[in-house]
Amino acid sequence: MPSSSNKTEYQWAVIGAGPAGIAAVGKLLDAGITSNQIIWIDPLFSVGFFGLKWGCVSSNTSVQLFIDFLAASPAFGIDVNIEKEKGTYELFRLPPESTCRLELATAPLIKVTETLRSKVESFVGTVELIRQCHDNSGWQLSLKGNDQTLNILTATKVVLATGSRPKTLQNADAKKTIPLETALQINSLRACVTETDTIAVYGSSHSAIMIVRDLFGRFINDSTGLKGDTAKWAKANLMGDGLPRNLVRVKSGSLDESHALKNLTKCIYAIGFEREPVAVEGVELDKYDATMGRIANGLYGVGIAFPERGEDAAGNLELQVGIWKFMRYLTRVLPFWVEDM
């Protein structure tokens, strides 16, 4: 912990330092929670997987929404107007309606992380176990520092912003599988694939289309890369019957799949994410309230691991995943968490 305090009891513990964890700490400070009553826990404080693994990914969030996120908490210490004038970060020099690589949004978030850590207490390490205190007054956290030291802390309330990791299929061949974080970085992908490979890309989401685009536009043709965002490329190349050369599109589980995979040499799974495991004794995390983020008494979840369920633009219910959606959600529910007894 940055302070010299030997405190072991806190009002709030926030676990995870990705965008959702950053937003949670900022909003707690904005709500008037005393800074020395907040403990923030993460093994690296490098903006989570958002900052560590996905920097080369093209966002499906506009630059303006990243800027809105940075402006949403006074505790972040980011003056958006000054940043636009100074141009400290490239993010602020981009057209607001455009998209960008996630690394451009990571840079100011690293600065925000440093600012928040100077205001609250933090612990560099991992959470081994969370259990309710014997008198039900809060939660006991068993922590392991990066130096392998063991620590026990208690917090009246805990926010899980623990993030998620890519899914794979249970029968996946590890020898043939290219990890998603490798596939989404063009130089790493180039080192894993040859022109003679037969590659299966599982999924049809943003990440999957990016990988297909890179395999065709940046690897096989050895070009400098296609211009425009992923959606535009998909509309131009994957809609209709005129698919790119050497691309076969089949439904998973169909007879066509077995035939298409007969000569498979490599596979990439872009089939979504699953919650990073966190051990909470006696609590079923899957039963969290997806409208208010409540998991149990004094235990809350936010971010990609515990997303809000809300309406999309068409009025359909869906899980709300995205950095601005996390902030908007916290702005709405955190006052209820503070008052929750």
Image (tube, helix red, strand yellow):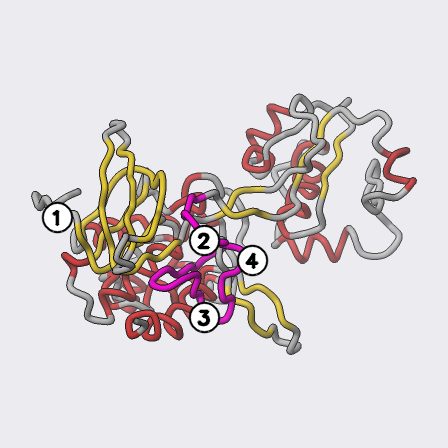
Furthest residue in direction bottom, as rendered: 315
- Residue for point 35% across, 38% down: 128
Vertical side of 277 occupied by 316: above or below: below
Hey, what amino acid is under mark 4?
A: Asn
For the residues labelled 1 and 2, the Cα–Cα distance comes to 26 Å
Give the label on residue 60, or none.
4
**Residue under label 1:** 7
Residue 283 tag number: 2
Give coordinates of residue 23: x percent, y percent. Answer: 34, 60
Instruction: State the residue lying farthest toward the front.
Output: 135
* Residue 288 among those drawn in magenta: yes
Residues rendered magenta in the picture? 278-304
Name the mark nearer the viewer: 2 or 3: 2
CB-based contact (under 8 Å), mark 2 and mark 3: no
Q: Compute the Cα span from label 4 to label 3.
A: 25 Å
Element marked by disc 2: loop
179 or 161: nearer the eye?
Answer: 161
The answer to whether 170 appears left or right of 338 in the picture is right
Q: Give me the C-alpha separation between circle 2 and circle 3.
A: 17 Å
